[in-house]
Structures are given as C-alpha cells and as structure tokens.
Image (spheres, grey):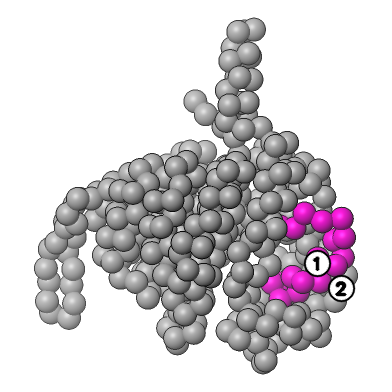
C-alpha cells in the first residue's frame, strides 16, 4: 500500500506553449534534467500555440518527465477530438501523459462561449473514458443517432479534472482519475476543497485516498516577498472577481473588486501588459493584501521556506503540485532554475524514499 510517507510528492511546472514547439521543448528538457516530475501545458487557442502539437514535440524530445494538459476543455474541442489527440500523445509517451480538463476559462471567454457546466462535464468525461477504453459511444445530434468507437484506444490515459467550486470538486471525486485543485496552498481553502472531493468519492463508493490530488500554486523563490507579491495583484483580483472573495476573507484578505475591469486584455490572469494590469488592480488590491495572498495561497519565499511548505503540503494527502510563474507569454525559465537547483535537491525523491522504506522494513 502506498502512502504519502512512501510515495514522493510529484513536483511539476506549468509551461505555456508561448513559442514554437521546438523552442518550448528546450524548456521542458531543462526541467527534466533538473529533476521535475511533470510539465503541464495550458490550452487556449488564441493565447498560445496548439497544446497537442506542443505535447507531441515534448513527447518526442524527452524520456522521463510526465506530460499533461492543465488544462484543455470540452467546449472548444469536441470530446471525440480530445480522445483522438490524447491517444496520439500517449502513444509517443507511454505511461507519461495525463489529460487534465477544465471548464474552459481563457479558451471560451475570448470567443464568446460559456464555460462547461457540471452536467456537460460529466457527460464529456463519460464519453472520453468510453472512447479511450475502446467502447462504443452513442452520438446524438438532433434526430440523428450513430454509434462509433475509437480505433487503437489508449485506456491507460488518466483523466484529471481541474476544479475550484463545490459541484466540480464533488464531480471530480466521483468520476475523475485525479483532481487538479485550484484552491492554492492555503490550508483553509485546501481543507474545504479536499472535503468536497472526498464527498464525491464516497457517494460513488470510491476510496478517496487513492485519488491523486495535484495543487496548482504560483511560486517565486525570493528574499523579497513584498516586491514579488505586488506582481500577483491581478491574480488576487481575478479570484475575488470570480466568486472567490469569501475564500480570500478566510485568510484575512478583504477586497472588493468590480465585476468588470477595463484596460486589460484578454483577462486579468493572462494580461498581455502585465505591468499595466498590476497598476490597474492596485486600485482594489493593496500591497498588504498582495503580500498576505502570496504568503497564504502561493509559494513565495526562500528556497528553504518553499521546501518546508511542500513537505507540509505532502502530509495533508496532496500527491503533487504544479508551480506557476507570473506570466503567460514567456517560459518559466527562472522558476525552473531556482526550484530545480535549490528546492528539488532538498525534497525526498523516489530513490531516496525507496532506500528509507527498505531500511524501515529491515528493522521491523
């Protein structure tokens, strides 16, 4: 039986497909050499290059590192198309690919579509699993119904659902192979999020302890938290703007942000002019609130501080993290170097844990 004690925390990094695929792969190779466990690629058709094209290049250009979408969606991409694309990547990186799915966010907003509802996500996940397993699915459009299946399926592809709200957290616990928690690393919000996942798992008769939990967190290795925290004001403002103000308040961050903020394209989290977005959001997010947000929800601080927080996070049952830098249109080069050289060497890795486990067994 694997437990947090015997299974190392998987540390991944988010790499936006912000350049030609071959150039992005150079960043992925560096992360692999430094010991990262996973690289996660976001998917937004107007913001970045095609995510599955980038994944294909990464699969061919690496040997060990896990590859995943964080996340793609079932609104701009039909589930059958996602199944085929996922199968194609999984063939090139056997056992290394994870399909992360979400409601759409920056994929749907810029083209006027709505985010995927929980009901549509449930159906889409069911369709994806059936197709990847090689089973037939009944497709119905208007009065036309046809049963079809995917040739050369890949049933081993895990489906992870990114979630922050209670409905999708429960849905993830009920039907997904893993969960990407968008609650940050705050113990207060993380506890609530994992409780909802557990509720969904128990309702479906599943063992919640076997469901991988990956936490998304903005990260900066720094001695000057105040300076770095100012840069994440748009992130804090976006959370408050999208219904997260009560969660922020739990950590003592009381902010009121208007429903619409002008002067930022395409949105607060992916602003093309980040400095301008920071200045605009300063009207509602004070420097003090930004520091509090960085300290509570993010992994900001010295390498030693981040290492200790990751160790503590692992004891709560979290099985993985994927770290994000502030920025959407440049690779996280500095973050990869800092975490890879200063944090990862201080964390237990697979070989170290294996030796520890063997030693304990010998003394029993």
Q: Disc 2 and disc 1: Cα gap in Å?
A: 8 Å
Where does label 2 land, which residue?
A: 287
At horizontal 37% and vertical 46% (from top left) the residue drawn is 93
At horizontal 47% and vertical 80% (from top left) the residue drawn is 46
- Residue 149 percent across, percent down from the top left: 16, 58
Where does label 1 land, which residue?
A: 229
Which quadrant: the C terminus? Answer: top right
Check disc 1 and report its element: helix, strand or loop: helix
Query: Farthest bottom residue?
Result: 262
Is 150 on the left-hand or right-hand side of 318?
A: left
Is 133 on the left-hand or right-hand side of 269?
A: left
Is 252 on the left-hand or right-hand side of 219?
A: right
- Residue 103 percent across, percent down from the top left: 46, 69
Assess whether residue 223 is covered by the magenta stretch: yes
Residue extent of the magenta highlight: 219-236
State the residue in front, 272 or 214: 272
Question: Of callouts 2 and 1, which one flags the residue occurring earlier in the amino acid sequence?
Answer: 1
């Amino acid at each position: 039986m694997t437990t947090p004690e015997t299974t190392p925390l998987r540390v991944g990094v988010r790499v936006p497909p912000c350049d030609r695929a071959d150039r992005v792969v150079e960043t992925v190779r560096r992360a692999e050499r430094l010991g990262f466990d996973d690289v996660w690629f976001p998917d937004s058709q107007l913001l970045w290059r095609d995510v599955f094209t980038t994944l294909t290049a990464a699969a061919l250009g690496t040997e060990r590192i896990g590859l995943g979408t964080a996340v793609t969606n079932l609104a701009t991409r039909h589930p059958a198309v996602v199944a085929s694309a996922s199968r194609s990547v999984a063939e090139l990186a056997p056992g290394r690919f994870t399909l992360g799915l979400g409601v759409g966010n920056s994929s749907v907003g810029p083209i006027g579509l709505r985010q995927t509802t929980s009901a549509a996500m449930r159906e889409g996940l069911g369709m994806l699993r059936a197709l990847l397993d090689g089973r037939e699915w009944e497709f119905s459009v208007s009065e036309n119904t046809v049963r079809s299946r995917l040739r050369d399926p890949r049933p081993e592809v895990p489906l992870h659902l990114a979630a922050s709200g209670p409905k999708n957290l429960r849905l993830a616990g009920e039907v997904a192979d893993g969960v990407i928690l968008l609650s940050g690393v705050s113990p207060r919000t993380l506890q609530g999020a994992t409780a909802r996942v557990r509720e969904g798992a128990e309702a479906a008769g599943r063992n919640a302890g076997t469901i991988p939990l990956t936490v998304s967190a903005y990260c900066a290795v720094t001695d000057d938290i105040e300076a770095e925290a100012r840069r994440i004001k748009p992130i804090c403002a976006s959370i408050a703007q999208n219904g997260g103000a009560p969660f922020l308040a739990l950590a003592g961050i009381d902010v009121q942000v208007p429903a619409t903020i002008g002067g930022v394209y395409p949105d607060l989290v992916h602003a093309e002019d980040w400095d301008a977005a920071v200045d605009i959001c300063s009207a509602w997010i004070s420097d003090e609130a930004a520091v509090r947000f960085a300290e509570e929800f993010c992994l900001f601080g010295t390498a030693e501080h981040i290492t200790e927080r990751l160790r503590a996070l692992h004891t709560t049952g979290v099985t993985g993290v994927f770290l994000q830098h502030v920025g959407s249109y440049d690779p996280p080069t500095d973050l990869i170097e800092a975490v890879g050289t200063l944090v990862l060497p201080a964390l237990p890795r697979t070989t170290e844990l294996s030796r520890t486990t063997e030693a304990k067994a010998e003394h029993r």
